[in-house]
Image: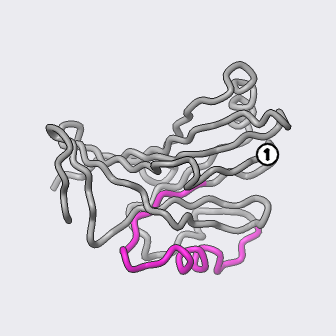
């Protein structure tokens, strides 16, 4: 693992063994999608925390509608593993809807997130007042990880919103 000092106890991490990727269930195609870009990782020793972020909204910017099933995943995977192969493995079971059971055995430190219809309706209601905000979800499978998404108003349809710029935080395990 290569570390690059930023300031104080914050370090930009480049892990030679693992990369962290973001995936989501695409409601239009009814399959999992894994983004080809990896998260930029920052370690905070003082907070005992690892953070990952996408630097640009262009890396992930997707329109979701009220009736969509919103499932997201943060995963650590061997650096040599391609996002295309992971995507194929996640869709191998051909399930008609997304579940935790779609996650391949070789993924590590996985966080699975669900934004249910109740949360989405509240987010759409809030977007009528403020055209963008951040929303944080807790993982249903990993108590040490949380996902933050940036939500944007869709001015063309108030029953949909854009989701962009995922980031995550997780507690570093001490041994």
Q: Which residues are magenta?
A: 72-96
Q: Quadrant of the N terminus?
A: bottom left
Q: Quadrant of residue 49?
A: top left
> Which residue shows up at 56% across the image and 50% down it?
113
Q: Nearer the viewer, residue 87 or 58?
A: 58
Q: Is residue 87 left or right of residue 129?
A: left
Q: Single out the residue that lies furthest toward the top.
A: 129
Q: Position of residue 79 (x, y in %)?
A: 36, 74
Q: Quadrant of residue 26?
A: bottom right
> Which residue shows up at 77% across the image and 68% down it?
96
Q: Is residue 114 magenta?
A: no
Q: Position of residue 165 (x, y in %)?
A: 54, 46
Q: Is residue 78 magenta?
A: yes
Q: Is residue 155 left or right of residue 169?
A: right
Q: Is residue 16 left or right of residue 107?
A: left
Position above or below: 39 against 16 = above
Q: Nearer the viewer, residue 170 or 140?
A: 170
Give the number of callouts.
Answer: 1
- Rate crowding at label 1 as few (under 14), some (14 to 19) or many (20 or more) other CA atoms within 10 Å: some
Residue that label 1 marks: 65
Q: Quadrant of the C terminus?
A: bottom left
Q: Position of residue 154 (x, y in %)?
A: 77, 37
Position above or below: 94 against 27 = below
Q: Position of residue 78 (x, y in %)?
A: 37, 75
- Its colouring scheme is one colour
Kind of element beneath mark 1: strand
> Which residue shows up at 38% across the image and 45% down it?
169
> Which residue shows up at 74% across the image and 47% down it?
64
């Amino acid at each position: 693992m290569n570390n690059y000092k930023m300031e104080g106890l914050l370090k930009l991490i480049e892990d030679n063994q693992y990369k962290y990727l973001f995936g989501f269930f695409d409601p239009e195609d009814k399959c999992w999608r894994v983004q080809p870009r990896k998260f930029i990782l920052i370690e905070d020793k003082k907070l005992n925390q690892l953070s990952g972020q996408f630097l640009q909204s262009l890396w992930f910017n997707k329109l979701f509608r009220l009736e969509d099933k919103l499932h997201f995943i943060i995963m650590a995977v061997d650096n040599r593993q391609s996002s295309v192969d992971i995507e194929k493995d996640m869709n191998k079971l051909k399930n008609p809807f997304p579940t935790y059971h779609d996650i391949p055995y070789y993924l590590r430190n996985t966080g699975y997130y669900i934004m249910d219809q109740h949360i989405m309706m509240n987010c759409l209601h809030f977007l009528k007042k403020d055209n963008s905000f951040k929303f944080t979800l807790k993982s249903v499978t990993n108590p040490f990880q949380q996902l933050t998404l940036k939500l944007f108003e869709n001015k063309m349809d108030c029953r949909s919103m854009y989701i962009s710029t995922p980031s995550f935080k997780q507690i570093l395990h001490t041994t």
